[in-house]
Image (tube, grey):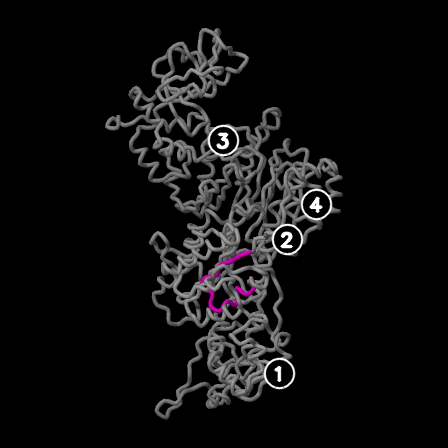
Amino acid sequence: MKKPLTYISLFSSAGVGCFGFKQNNFECIATNEILIKRLKIQVYNNKCKYHSGYLNGDISAKEVKNKLFTEIELWKNKHKIKEPDVLIATPPCQGMSVANHKKNNEKTRNSLVVESIKITKKVLPKFFIFENVRAFLNTICTDIDGKDKPIKEAIHLNLGGNYNILSRVINFKEYGSNSSRTRTLVIGVRKDLQNITPFDIFPKKKKAKTLRQLIGKLPSLKKMGEISENDIFHSYREFDKRMLPWIEDLKEGQSAFENTDENKIPHRIIDGIKVLNKSKNGDKYARWYWDKVAACVHTRNDILSSQNTIHPTDNRVFSIRELMRMMSIPENFEWSDIKTNDLNKLSLLEKKAFLKREELNIRQCIGEAVPTGVFESIASNIKKVLSQKIITISEIKRLVQDYQLNITENLINFINANFDNYSLENILLIAELSNSQRQNTSAFFTRKDIAFTIIKDLPELKKKKNIRILEPSVGVGNFLPLLFEKYSNKNEVIIDVYDIDKSSIKILKTVLEKINIPSNFKINIFNDNFLLHKFDKRYDIVVGNPPYKKLTKNKDLLTRYKLGAVNKKTNNLFSFFIDKSISLGTFVSLIVPKSILNSPEFNESRKLLLNYNLEKICDYGEKAFKGVKIETISFLVNTNPKTKSDNVIIESYIDNSYQVKSKEYIFSNKFPYWLIYRNETFDKLVSKMNLDIFQSFRDRQITKKHTKDKGRIRVLKARNIGNNEIKDLTDYDKYVDDFVGLAVAKFLNENNVVMVPNLTYYPRASFLPKNTIADGSVALLTLKNGSRLPTEKDLEFYSTKEFETYYRIARNHGTRSLNIDNNSVFFFGLLKKQEV
């Protein structure tokens, strides 16, 4: 049985926006609305499969939320879904709207968005969509932690660990609506949905129709109270006849306040005296234009005194049918338990009675709605991305073999012949993995969702209409489509891309010929060595995924690289890329090995980054590059000396977290390197210990060829170490007779040498016994700084769960960067006297 596509809708009013999901055959698990008269309209449209899915009431109430969770469980059991595909939330916007002139303290009401956040966090749908007014994200709410903060911050802190999030203020008339409506749209895509980003499901641009194109062929309504014979929802809504002279002479675009005759200017009679009304927004009692897109449809679209409500030629407010077309609501949307076709068969008196009873509610529902066409576009995009198939590594290997794609010309011919048969992501993946030089150039494919985590936090650069971007190691161009999306609103974007690999450059050019490069982008392609190229310009942004490779064989080239490098203690290429990128760009964001956080080799690199405003670190662990045994992070640094901040964003794929932390706290000079997961638990244990007690030694000379099954001196390995004990292991123990020339020999029969296994999160320790040495799987710790001697109780402490939790934080939850070196040995402290 094929699993249905599903969604949940919160604060759904009459379900106008959500109808776009119904149009795409999504099943509604549950829909919540506090006003029963609006919820009933959803029932009329058969929104939910089960009647129990219609949830009337305050979603912040425990009983209503429990009904929601019960309904989700019903769908899990009956339809075998793991979770809803989509959660939609459009919480009330009182206190945020610029049209609300009666703002008071609305924090409690605005905090209804926090209910949406809580439910999203618990349900974890594949996608979430929040929609609200322009000022939404900057509005203060009371967050889950009880602290007041901007809604944007609350969304990211609570959901940014699990979701890639995109928020934009857009005018819906450019995205599927036929009326102007500037709103905030927030879209989240769960991070385990690889190769899907919020850009993929963002509504597609669509040119809105003018009012003439939209409603010009509808019958003109001249008489007050007139109802179109064939459409009950196309009617002339009655109003106070004394207002008719105010509007009947207006031309398109004019307001009654522009009348020169004082009797035709909106007014009231108070105690026999004419008092002119005040024009607050300048668009009251205003006639709209035939050949423009409709103005924003407001809640009070039923009255002349609301904004731009008057028909271009008829002396009336727009009809319900006209408003529906402006809001892209399909004609088959039902407003009553009586179908529209049947309503049209009623007598005139029955029609008038129906409208008197229902019209105001319908109009308010339309005025508060998300245009159906906008959500229809999002639903269509979600449907598309969930159906797309990402090619597997084994399939690529087969293609490489069948078509000999490791030959560049064959790969180019394949792309030209098959571009329309594969998604762009698949084409880029095939191109990257077909490159026979990828191991030599250390080129690793950057998945689209990973690239998005870099692109999403790049600055908007709102004050600049023309920007210049540099990508120093472009490969086949994985970042470019996302940059097109990110900076689509700029007048001109110049992107200079470099790569040392000729094949990659040829493939990149082929791919770019196949995709639609936006007209405001210009791409300059250079087949050159970025590290040796002499630049004569600076860039607003430098972004990319440089190669990770130690240069050991070509000493001359290494010397040339080091000439311009800040960190001359390494021979790893990525460090040189950091140094040069920072010298060229205002904002620099790169994906680099995680070892930069802690390795002594990159002490100077860390100092360099802290000279500037380090804004963000994202820890991917081993999740960024499938099949590549390397841990990575990305960073964003602002090199503008005028910008400094006390905090840094720490985003983690390891523990699904998104936090804002104090730089002074996680970059503290009390410790030898950065601790991005430092917390109160860590600090509590630190307070119990004296740190920086030991220095570390690991033997790198002893190999299998040096050892044998029997001999004079036992060679201990990691598995021999227990908790204050040495384990004898059958077919594991090794010996040597001759240790002359081995550096580790200096520890033979030394007192108080502590052994701990290298590369483990389960530390255990024992003293080095007499007549033994250890190989490289063991770190030997010896005292420094005149500390007291360690005891067996100290060593026993290293085996506790408490120390393990602390040690994981001390090692930044690494999986491969776990060598015990003279930085990390710092954290093997000795308990303070009162703890012993």
Instruction: Say what amino acid the circle numbered 2 marks.
Output: Phe
The mark that comes first in sequence, 2 or 3, is 2
Question: Where is mark 2, residue-wise?
Answer: 521
* Residue 727 vertical placement versus 48 (above, below): above
Task: Examine the rendering and report whether any part of residue 452 can be seen.
Answer: yes
Mark 1 sits on what residue?
219
Residue 586 visible in rendering: no
- Could you tell me which residue is drawn at 46 percent across and 45 percent down? 615
Displayed quadrant of residue 509: top right
Instruction: Check if residue 8 falls in the magenta segment.
Output: yes
Task: Tell me which label, 1 or 2, sits earlier in the chain.
Answer: 1
In this figure, which residue is indicated by the disc labeled 4? 509
Q: Secondary structure at mark 4?
A: helix
Give percent across and percent down for residue 506.
71, 41
Q: Marks 2 and 4: in contact by CB < 8 Å?
A: no
Count residues near mark 3 (Cα–Cα under 10 Å), then give few for <14, some for 14-19, many for 20+.
some
The image position of residue 672, as x and y in percent, is: 40, 31
Q: Which residues are magenta?
A: 5-20
Q: Position of residue 195 (x, y in %)?
A: 58, 47
